[in-house]
């Protein structure tokens, strides 16, 4: 039975690519207090994206401390918090020495340095065999290929690394001390987990000559991974001994946070990357999606991913719009102006593959394209064209998935920062012809982690029950039939862009590599 948890709270900690959010949730999924702290990211050279794991920790501490401070200012003691779980950026790999310090900067999921290893590893192991074991076709995003790159290009760092860890296991160790440990669904995006046995894949570890002792221990979702040490409690303001339960990848946590526990609903996270997923009970793999373990511990998520989502909008604004994000009203101004433009941005189209493309092309050399540009276009046209491209691409991916599954998805549930945009929400409904439900919180990944913590704390009989109780009411955006038919014409043009430019992009990438 559900406990009487009046004034009882859990924390969902979302350590994402750009920031950490620590949110205190009640048993109805209401946001009671939120702490936030940015995480710096470096781009030291072409196609390389890195972070310092120490920044994950300092950002985590600051966000937690801010959350606790807000609770206390509202007269709520930190002792009301009964558990914590982490949602973390996926496919990001940290290299930790025996003394607990990094031996090399963490390689992010955005990083493309391992393109050659994608080809060579797939050739040696077999692309289909990798896909069957891990649920993922060969691509630069899973850590498998970053492992191979590190071993080949940084042999001393490889030798000096005692532990190869995901974000969650790093933070859990800092919070609770002890060994590195994580969940199945945080580890499986690394691309070296057998997705059917939920264990590290022996064939893949043997290929890398990587001993399992250098990897985190794997646990089921909501397993108690440890308790806060006195030192961590002092830093964060949380109570000593607070249990930390096994959370995992932010995409899967977002699916849980939107109560995507049936196959009728697709969540779509309009965040740094744009990720859409559908829950299924059985394991299937296909090039139309990547398959991942579901956060509730049962079944799988079939997921589409466009790596350059809101990341691309932020990049464009910072690089090409006067004053960039230093102008706090810049996005509102662009949104308002872009809403007045016609469908198709007056003949301007973007291919948003600024970091390669995953499904359905799985092409690491794909790049961004700006097509149809004329002297009549301005920054607003480009801004709208970026949102249109991301939306067209995701709708096509969903339709490809529906065709492969032989199953129609009834509606989307939109989350992430982009879900705050009326233009983007309406565009998604109009392009897809499907209703778009909007969650009461855009922080679905943190809410999903909170649901796991709520189950771990004994509030609900299952993680799925926690999702049903805490996901909240939604508002609906209905598609405009007239706009839908207009967007169908645009989709047919968009589908041709990749095939028309793929070879040119491959040649340009190869040319740049020879500098």
Image (cartoon, grey):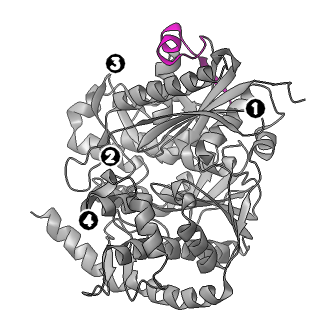
Q: Which residues are magenta?
A: 221-240
Q: Residues within 10 Å of mark 2 (few under 14, many from 20)?
A: many
Can residue 198 be seen in the rendering of this structure? no
Residue occupying the far top of the picture: 230
Q: Secondary structure at mark 4?
A: helix
The CA span between labels 3 and 1 is 34 Å
Between 100 and 434, the one nearer to me in the picture: 434
Q: Nearer the viewer, mark 1 or mark 2?
A: 1
Q: Secondary structure at mark 1?
A: helix
Sequence-wise first label, 3 or 2: 3
The CA span between labels 4 and 3 is 44 Å
Sequence-wise first label, 1 or 4: 4
Marker disc for residue 320: 4
Sequence-wise first label, 4 or 3: 3
Residue at point 47% right, 36% down?
20
Between 263 and 342, the one nearer to me in the picture: 342
Q: Is 63 colored magenta in this rendering?
A: no
Residue at point 61% right, 31% down?
85
The residue singled out by tag 2 in the image is 148
Q: Secondary structure at mark 3?
A: loop
Q: Nearer the viewer, mark 3 or mark 1?
A: 1
The residue singled out by tag 3 in the image is 98
Q: Residues within 10 Å of mark 3 (few under 14, many from 20)?
A: few
Going by the image, does 263 lie left or right of 404?
Answer: right
| x then y, percent, for residue 242 | 63, 16
Q: Kindly check if marks 4 and 3 are in contact, taking CB atoms under 8 A apart as contact.
A: no
């Amino acid at each position: 039975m559900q406990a009487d948890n009046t004034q009882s709270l859990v924390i969902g900690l979302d350590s994402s690519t750009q920031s950490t959010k620590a949110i205190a949730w009640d048993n109805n999924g209401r946001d009671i207090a939120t702490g936030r702290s940015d995480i710096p990211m470096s781009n030291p050279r072409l196609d390389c994206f890195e972070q310092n794991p120490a920044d994950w920790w300092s950002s985590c501490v600051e966000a937690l401390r801010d959350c606790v401070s807000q609770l206390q200012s509202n007269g709520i003691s930190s002792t009301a918090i009964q558990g914590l779980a982490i949602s973390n950026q996926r496919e990001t790999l940290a290299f930790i020495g025996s003394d607990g310090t990094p031996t090399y900067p963490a390689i992010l999921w955005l990083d493309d340095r391992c393109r050659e290893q994608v080809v060579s590893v797939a050739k040696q192991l077999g692309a289909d065999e990798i896909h069957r074991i891990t649920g993922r076709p060969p691509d630069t995003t899973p850590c498998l290929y970053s492992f191979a790159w590190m071993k080949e290009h940084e042999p001393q760092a490889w030798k000096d690394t005692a532990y190869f860890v995901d974000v969650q296991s790093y933070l859990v160790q800092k919070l609770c001390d002890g060994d590195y440990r994580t969940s199945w669904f945080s580890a499986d995006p690394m691309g070296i987990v057998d997705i059917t046995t939920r264990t590290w894949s022996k064939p893949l570890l043997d290929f890398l000559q990587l001993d399992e002792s250098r990897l985190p221990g794997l646990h089921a979702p909501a397993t108690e991974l440890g308790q806060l040490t006195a030192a961590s409690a002092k830093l964060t303001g949380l109570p000593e001994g607070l249990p930390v339960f096994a959370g995992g990848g932010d995409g899967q946590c977002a699916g849980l946070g939107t109560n995507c526990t049936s196959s009728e609903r697709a969540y779509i996270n309009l965040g740094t990357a744009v990720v859409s997923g559908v829950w299924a009970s059985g394991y299937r793999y296909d090039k139309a999606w990547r398959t991942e373990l579901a956060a509730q511990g049962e079944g799988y998520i079939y997921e589409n991913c466009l790596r350059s989502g809101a990341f691309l909008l932020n990049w464009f604004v910072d690089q090409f719009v006067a004053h960039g994000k230093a102008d706090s009203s810049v996005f509102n101004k662009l949104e308002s102006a872009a809403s007045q433009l016609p469908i198709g941005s007056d003949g301007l189209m973007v291919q948003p593959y600024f970091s390669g493309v995953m499904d359905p092309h799985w092409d690491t050399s794909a790049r961004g394209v700006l097509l149809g540009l004329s002297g009549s276009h301005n920054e607003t046209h480009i801004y709208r064209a970026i949102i249109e491209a991301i939306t067209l691409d995701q709708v096509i991916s969903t339709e490809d998935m529906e065709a492969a599954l032989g199953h129609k998805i009834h509606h989307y549930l939109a989350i992430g920062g982009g879900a705050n945009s009326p233009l983007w929400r309406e565009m998604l409904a109009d392009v897809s012809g499907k209703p778009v439900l909007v969650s009461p919180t855009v922080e679905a990944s943190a809410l999903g982690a909170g649901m796991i913590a709520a189950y771990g704390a004994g509030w609900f009989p299952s993680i799925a029950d926690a999702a049903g109780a805490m996901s909240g009411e939604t508002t609906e955006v209905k598609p405009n039939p007239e706009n839908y038919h207009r967007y169908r014409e645009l989709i047919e043009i968009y589908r041709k862009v990749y095939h028309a430019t793929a070879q040119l992009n491959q040649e340009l990438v190869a040319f740049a590599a020879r500098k």
